[in-house]
Amino acid sequence: MSETTTASQGSQPSQPSQEFEKVLSGSSTQVASFDTHDKTALQKFQHFLHGSPSAVPLIVLVLSLAIFGVVLGGKFFSAFTMTLILQQVAIVGIVGAAQTLVILTAGIDLSVGAIMVLSSVVMGQFTFRYGLPPALSVLCGLAVGALCGYVNGLLVARMKLPPFIVTLGMWQIILASNFLYSANETIRSQDIARDAPLLQFFGSSIRIGGAVFTYGVIAMVLLVAVLWYVLNRTAWGRHVYAVGDDPDAAELAGVNVRYMLVSVYTLSGLICALAGWALIGRIGSVSPTAGQFANIESITAVVIGGLSLFGGRGSILGMLFGALIVGVFSLGLRLIGTDPQWTYLLIGVLIITAVAIDQWIRKVAG
């Protein structure tokens, strides 16, 4: 009988010997498993868009080209028309590259247009008012742009001021300084062509068949290509994305967040100064009133290009596609003969749609 009792006791599970172990007696003993159900086609597409931020604007660009091609016929796809679109978006593309760097860090720069115009005015005034060589005047204009960006970066990184407020204030300061310094005077195209043709360098063009490429277009394409490489293939570029995604985590990982922000805003200002030089070539003259809406146009290109305004996600190629979309709509509707207000209406719809798609794509990461 004792053997039977012992055997029955051996078959029973042992009782918890410690008080805290009693809570485990009723817990689940199942092995953890991962969700292995197949994703729907829509979910797969959502994941694809999340991994390729520039895919959405590229799809929209191709569709818009196809639609206007059907409506307008073969003349829309002529080499001259295609390169004309590139010429029209060259300035926006260069300023948009500067805006892209800032937005990737979860900031925004409302002063990009003012920096661009002030830099162009400095280049012109230093040449014609002070008699400096055009090459030296260009360097001074580039330095002024970089300095304005550096001040923005210091205020954002060191004083922890919101980028929107800082750049809004700098926009007003630089805009007023521009008009005060230039006395609202325009340097004529004829004078520049005669005495300082270097200032109009980016307006020069080369022809390849029926296509006409200005040096401003070439500069935009090269700039985007270089920045794409820097952002995707260098440590500095990865740090830009890290700061925009989560600055606290980036700092814990060893990234100097303050240095990154200052360097981004400084580089942004330098690129805006380059856009100022290209602006002189585009319009032929140095005007303090030119390019006043470049800040809004650059943000439009960035948003339509699929970059997240929350930072840390997007591609500079998407910005270029966004600028081209605006150019295609503007020229296409003009060729159709519609009221120009339809362009603004459709671009506004595109902006809201782009933000809605971005929120939908971000659900994957959430």
Image (tube, grey):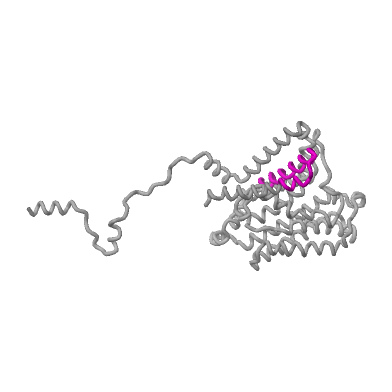
In the rendered image, residue 145, in percent from the top left (x then y), is placed at 76, 59
Determine the residue positioned at 9% across, 52% down.
3
* Nearer to us in this view, 74 or 138: 74
Determine the residue positioned at 88% across, 62% down.
183
Determine the residue positioned at 28% across, 57% down.
25
Residue 105 falls inside the magenta stretch: no
**Residue 98 in the image: above or below residue 210:** below
* Nearer to us in this view, 217 or 83: 83
* Nearer to us in this view, 296 or 201: 296
Q: Which residues are magenta?
A: 317-346
Q: Residue furthest bottom?
A: 159
Q: Residue furthest left?
A: 1
In the rendered image, residue 50, in percent from the top left (x then y), is placed at 57, 46
Q: Is residue 132 visible?
A: yes
Q: Is residue 137 visible?
A: no
> Along the horizontal axis of the image, is 295 left or right of 130?
left
Number of numbered discs on residues: 0
Quarter of the figure with residue 268: bottom right
**Residue 235 in the image: above or below residue 338:** below
* Nearer to us in this view, 31 or 192: 31
> Along the horizontal axis of the image, is 283 left or right of 95?
right
**Residue 225 in the image: above or below residue 124:** above
Quarter of the figure with residue 134: bottom right
Q: Main secondary structure of the magenta part?
A: helix
In the rendered image, residue 239, in percent from the top left (x then y), is placed at 60, 55
